[in-house]
Amino acid sequence: MPNSPEPSETILILGGTREAADLAREWVAANPEARIITSLAGRTREPAPLAGELRTGGFGGVEGLARYLRETGVTRLIDATHPFARQISANAMEATRIAGVPLDIRTRTPWVRQPGDDWIEVETLEAARDAIPPNARVLLALGSQHISQFAVRDDVHFVVRMIDPPDLPLELPGHALILGRPGDTPAVETMLLIAHSITHIVCRNSGGKAAYAKIEAARELGLLVIMVGRG
Ligand code: NAP
């Protein structure tokens, strides 16, 4: 049996975002001779299907990633991770330096306040928690690891949305849990905000299109957004 030809390029995309999945699809379509590998940390139980190859799980720090780059013959690393995933981005920078592999940084730029946006911008989740007025009804658009910080606000009704059910019950008194991805359109998000009588949104300034519909919906409804910046 003839050996399969060497790939023209081997590209590793550090993913976990919609943009990374889009990139993989574009690269696979445009470069059929290249090997395109997307790497996921493995946090989401059922990630959406991806074009090209998939590998899952941590590399074992900078050294592990540098080793993977060398052993796999990666010719370019693309960092398309979430902008708040800081450790892997720092590791990517150092590992590509060690392995002598070019790094292409494609992390999103933050959202910028638009006319009609009513934002309180804060640096930390603690500051976001403290900025919520008494008796508010808050859409808490954060990962499960950040939720417990809000537990002391037992005067607030929280609506929490997450993709996967949490492993343990959320440490949050009086909350509603919505399982699912963010709505694609402001109309879908507006319906959710109205249905739950939301008065405030707490979220991080992650940028990108995937989670922006709630910001547009808040603008439309005149709701206050407590926006945690990247520090
Ligand atoms: P992080 O704090 O920067 O990374 C922690 C460790 O997880 C890294 O040191 C690495 O382990 C492993 N890791 C992270 N991303 C990886 C990837 N794409 N492939 C392989 N290993 C990865 O990251 P995080 O904030 O936990 O985010 C994890 C993943 O979820 C990222 O891929 C990110 O794009 C996605 N995500 C994050 C957020 C968020 O709010 N942070 C939101 C949406 C999606 P080793 O050191 O062992 O290599």
Image (cartoon, rainbow, N blue to C red):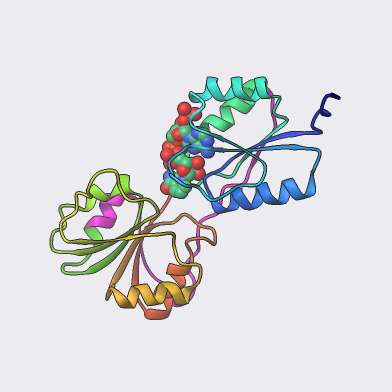
The vertical placement of 213 against 108, above or below, is: below
Counting labels gives: 0
Q: Is residue 68 left or right of residue 9?
A: left
Is residue 210 inside the magenta stretch?
no
Observer-nearest of 141 and 26: 26
The vertical placement of 116 against 125, above or below, is: below
Identify the residue shown where x is 38% and y is 77%.
Answer: 191
Is residue 113 inside the magenta stretch?
yes
Quadrant where the N terminus sits is top right
Q: Is residue 88 left or right of residue 136?
A: right
Identify the residue shown where x is 27% and y is 76%.
Answer: 197
Observer-nearest of 74 and 179: 179
Can residue 84 be seen in this snapshot?
no
Can residue 48 be seen in this snapshot?
yes
Q: Which residues are magenta?
A: 100-129
Observer-nearest of 80 and 228: 80
Residue 37, image quadrant: top right
Percent position (x, y) of residue 40? 52, 39
The vertical placement of 103 against 59, above or below, is: below
Q: Is residue 76 left or right of residue 152?
A: right
Identify the residue shown where x is 66% and y is 20%.
Answer: 71
Identify the residue shown where x is 69% and y is 24%.
Answer: 100
Percent position (x, y) of residue 186? 47, 74
The vertical placement of 6 against 202, above or below, is: above
Residue placed furthest toward the front: 1
Percent position (x, y) of residue 200? 30, 69
Residue placed furthest toward the right: 2
Percent position (x, y) of residue 21? 60, 50
